[in-house]
Amino acid sequence: MQMRIRIIKRLALGLAAATWTLAAAAVDISGAGATFPYPIYAKWADAYKKLTGIGLNYQSIGSGGGIKQIKAKTVIFGASDMPLKPDDLKAAGLVQFPMIIGGVVPVVNIKGVQPGQLHLDGATVASIYLGDITQWNDAQIKRLNPQLALPSTAIAPVYRSDGSGTNFLFSDYLSKANPKFKSNVGANTSVQWPTGIGAKGNEGVANMTTQTDGAIGYVEYAYAKQNKMAYTLLTNKAGVAVAPTAESFQAAAANADWVHADSFYLILTDQAGAKSWPITGASFILLYKQPDDAASVNEALKFFSWAYKDGASMAAELDYVPLPAPLIAQVKKTWASEITSSGRPIWSGK
């Protein structure tokens, strides 16, 4: 009888442990931040949920919001398209690593102008956002587009009103292209735009640009593609007019020296190369080096590892650039060496 009771107790304990394991496994991974990678994160989340039963609860609120939430410890990971400087990471006890690479593209709403027809350069786009160029038939724009019939329609610049990495990449590029923009506006996740209409998130800028006659905005390329928006060509650092494509993002990324980048701090705007898209950027993940919830961080790392390997083709379908294998290996080495709990690595390496 006592033997039977002991067996029943063992079975009960085993069942309780199994139930707890299933319950723990069913807990979603929480994250917040950049809208730039949201289309691919959403696609990855759907596929991963079907495969593992574990969901990704990602709030697409902008890089500034993601940085605030990870620092407040309200999410397991933050996401930002503006990399934090090594000193800032150290002060906050955070580690960062790149997750995906993509491009920010100017988009316009001009009657009769189709995707890829309008050619602009950084100096001209900066002048538009400074309010110095106010009509689409301005001489500076016409010089770049001698074969295109442009109307006298007033230009309506649309900008990100929230703190965002897309803002940072766009304003960083314009600062490199136009000295006046650099001195008057500068580069940051939030800047004081001299003119225009504010909208929240890549989604908001895409919608506002689509709804406003004569508008120009800037969004991650997946948003332009999904919404069939009229993206522009841009003159790159080599003086070549290039279109936003996975190939031109990859060309810019190919010049990146991640090996010597301290804490993966690297900005990919205005890279050299005849094929490089000039507003290319990486989107970064932020995690605590010594997190309070080690189990949830391990689940997040499993998701990121899966995304690197099995999500690469999905990323390419949306014209993001998956990270090259050597960089992924470098990232995972950082996981193993810097993210710990009770002095032991959280990442199992599987």
Image (cartoon, rainbow, N blue to C red):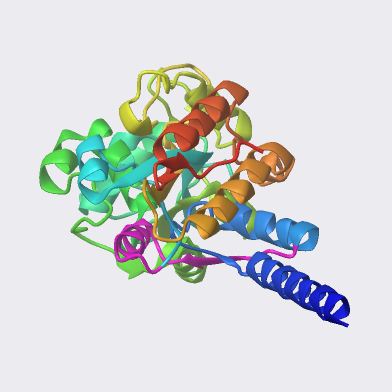
Magenta range is: 53-74
Image height of 216 relative to 187, above or below: below
Question: Can you say which quadrant of the picture contains the N terminus?
Answer: bottom right
Q: Nearer the viewer, residue 212 or 160?
A: 160
Instruction: Name the spot of residue 208 as percent of width and height, x first.
Output: 45, 69
Question: Can you say which quadrant of the picture contains the C terminus?
Answer: top right
Instruction: Name the spot of residue 274 as percent of width and height, x first.
Output: 49, 17
Q: Nearer the viewer, residue 276 or 110?
A: 276
Instruction: Give the quarter of the image for residue 131.
Output: bottom left
Is residue 65 inside the magenta stretch?
yes
Query: Is residue 113 shown to the viewer in this render?
Result: no
Q: Nearer the viewer, residue 86 or 119?
A: 86
Q: Nearer the viewer, residue 156 or 291?
A: 291
> Farthest residue toward the front?
2
Instruction: Name the spot of residue 148 as percent of width and height, x first.
Output: 51, 41
Image height of 236 relative to 123, above or below: above
Name the residue at 27% across, 43% down.
89
Q: How many marks?
A: 0
Is residue 250 inside the magenta stretch?
no
Image height of 205 relative to 294, above or below: below
Instruction: Name the spot of residue 136 as percent of width and height, x first.
Output: 38, 51
In the image, taking residue 53 as reference, residue 203 lies left or right, namely: left
In the image, taking residue 105 as reference, residue 247 lies left or right, namely: right
Name the residue at 34% across, 64% down.
65
Query: Is residue 10 shown to the viewer in this render?
Result: yes
> Farthest residue toward the left?
183
